[in-house]
Image: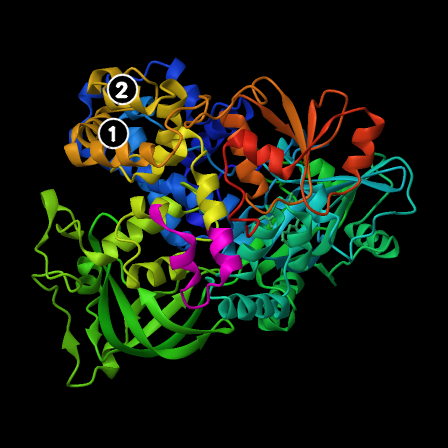
Amino acid sequence: MLLLRQRSSKFRKKSWCREIFFRRRKAIATGGGGGMFHSVEHGNLATVPRAAEIEFAELADSIGEHDRRYYRDGAPTIGDGEYDGLRRRMEFLLEKYPALRRLHVPAVGDDRMDKFTRRPHLAPMLSLNNTYCEEDLRQFIGRVEKVSGGETEFAVEPKIDGLAMAVIFRDGRFAYALTRGNGAEGDDVSANVRTIGELPMEIQLAGTVEVRGEVYVDRENFLRLNAMRAEEGLEPFASARNLAVGSLRLLDPERAAERRLRFIAYDIGCGDGQFQTHSQVLCTLRSLGFPTNDHTVCRGAEETWRAVVHLGSCRRDYPFDTDGAVVKVNGRALRLLLGAQATAPRWAMAYKFSPERAETILENITLRVGRSGVLTPVADLRPVSLGGTTIRSATLHNGDDIARKDLRIGDSVIVERAGEVIPAVVAAVHAKRPPWATPFTFPDKCPACSGSLVRIGGEVACRCLNCDCPPQIFRRIQHFASKDAMDIESLGPQRISQLMDAGMLLHFVDIFRLNRSALASQRRMGDKSADRLLGAIEGAKKRPLWRLIHGLGIPHVGAETAKILAGKWPSMEKLMDLSGEQLQLCGGIGEVVAASAVKFFSDGHSRRLIAQLAEYGLSMADGEAAPKGDVAGPFAGKIFAISGTFAAMARDAIGEAIAARGGTVRKSLSKKIDMLLVGESPGSKVAEAEKLSIPTVDEGTLMGWLGVDGSAAAGI
Ligand code: IVH
């Protein structure tokens, strides 16, 4: 079971880290996340210095967000090293101030999503120990050979940068496919996995067979899809892995099919131990029709290391992204003898290739203004090819970071790209510094709005205090509409910029004032796109309360905290009038978060904003009848299934709207289903429903029940 993103070896070496791994594993296994800590006495939060509590709350928020981006969205925005640093700092604070465990501690390594049915794995789905260091790899081989008693056979194969999948066959037929999830249970993504053309749906093997492998998008297809997105004015996918993760998470298999997902098998479980070696497993998989990778069988450390180095030198020749080599014990009996640790087997190790580096010129340093006004310096680079893509900019974190690295505009700099995330400037090549190289000085005024800049309470970050600063507005709207908050699918960054430039968006509340004719007159925005956007906005009005709380952008209130708040007080009206003490009665909410929420909700501006959103018909409570005469009746306590696509709302939005009205949506049909919601191009469920005498409901009726005006989407 994967507990932490398997990152640097440094991180794993610490014994206290191991203990934390173990505690986390239990937290996940009991479904408790950080919650398991509440039952243990950890002391009083009042004994924790305020600065530590603030730092912890920010770390927890940011780690939670990075985990979601990595595991669930497949879109990490920081490198492994930086992520490890955040985790290490959080664990340090927890060690020093155990009372912090009373607050929300982000759970780890979980890619499950609410919108899929979950199923248990036949055997725990573990991860791999990994390292960037030759010595670690040699030590691993040494440990194995100590157990085996001599030179041992290892298989070396590429580590595919996709996502792990377990595909189950019953008596030769595809049964279902699961993501890793939390290692014990995964999301059933069978409908999307069925679209993978090269995955056999029938195999010549009886009984229950589990094939494990990696789902990925090949580089060529990644470039093709990104070119198409650019033409449509949509944000490109940051990496092939992001694209693969996002595609498997689609609720519409037809859209998933367009992504041309691929699969490479690397293991098989049949339960009867019929294979002696990993080579035999791969050979059998191939003969059953599964795509597999070539592997090299090596004896001992020298040969194995040579194979790893060779693989690294030709990593670009593979059609997929690979960030390392996996070294596995070839003999299956020896594997059994070696066994596994909590999170990874003792018979395998991934050697991660060092991040790719390149040298280029730092042409300028510009400042990017974030949602809360924090200014982040960005390096404008002379374009340079790195890891197969052209890099034009890189993150510089903050002013102190620039000073520490002594970076000057005009310097030759080394840029590094760890995995497929935003590149970073590692260092300047001081020997090559030209005489005209200019040190960077932070301006006194915000470069975007000329507002005053301050450093609050000794923070390294510099903030613009003008809340009407355009880039802040942009990022607040972007956050509000994002997948993690209100999930307004057609409102990406480019569309937001376009509508801001046209004066149609000055605040996120303006999203609900957009009208069809003004939208349709925009560039790259015909009637169809306008309808799609309006449909998505309509869907957003029915989102669960936690999404709205998160979308408001209250400092220190991330998605997890928003879920805790909405879980305890599922009504905005109630939440707005709670005191700090009342908020802290809720497990996981500390003084800092409580004070921030109280400050936000007691501010006249925030209260007016919430009132306006309510007037526009946004749901302000979970499980309530939606405003404007909506009927909760058809949904409360009822179980639905869905077939086909809907013009006015995405399927997940429909799921959420039904859940908000007390109903449930299930993936598959059974006698328990009360109604089948039928959209365009429905599948075999309609015939099945007829057989089971389950009534069907069409889109018009459904939208009527939901109080959504489907006419715009239908082009009326
Ligand atoms: S074997 C017990 N082989 O890497 C886990 N994994 O970082 C055995 N991966 O979760 C996994 N290529 O998703 C194996 N050739 C390969 C792989 C591979 C990619 C992924 C897999 C795993 C992750 C661990």
Helix, strand or loop for disc 2: helix
Q: Circle 2 sits on which residue?
A: 583
| Residue at left offset 30%, top offset 54% | 505
Looking at the figure, which quarter contains the N terminus? top right
Q: Is residue 625 on the magenta stretch?
A: no
From the viewer's perspective, tell me whether residue 367 is left or right of residue 348: left
Q: Which mark is residue 593?
A: 1
Q: How many marks?
A: 2
Residue 643: x percent and y percent? 70, 39
- Mark 2 near mark 1, Cβ–Cβ under 8 Å? yes
- Label located before the other in sequence (2 or 1): 2
The answer to which of 194 and 331 lies nearer the viewer is 194
Neighbourhood count class around disc 1 (C-alpha, 10 Å): few under 14, some 14–19, many 20 upward: many
Spatial CA span between label 2 and label 1: 9 Å
From the viewer's perspective, tell me whether residue 494 is left or right of residue 322: left
Helix, strand or loop for disc 1: helix
Q: Is residue 206 visible?
A: yes
| Residue at left offset 48%, top offset 49% | 489
The answer to which of 445 and 262 lies nearer the viewer is 445
Name the colour scheme. rainbow
The answer to which of 114 and 519 lies nearer the viewer is 519
In the image, residue 335 above or below residue 308: above
Neighbourhood count class around disc 2 (C-alpha, 10 Å): few under 14, some 14–19, many 20 upward: many
Which amino acid type is marked by label 2?
Answer: Leu
Residues drawn in magenta:
513-533
Asked where in the image residue 2 lies, by quadrant, the reply is: top right
Residue 710: x percent and y percent? 54, 42
Q: Magenta region's main secondary structure?
A: helix
The answer to which of 704 and 289 lies nearer the viewer is 704
Disc 2 residue: CB within 8 Å of ligand 1: no
Which amino acid type is marked by label 1?
Answer: Val
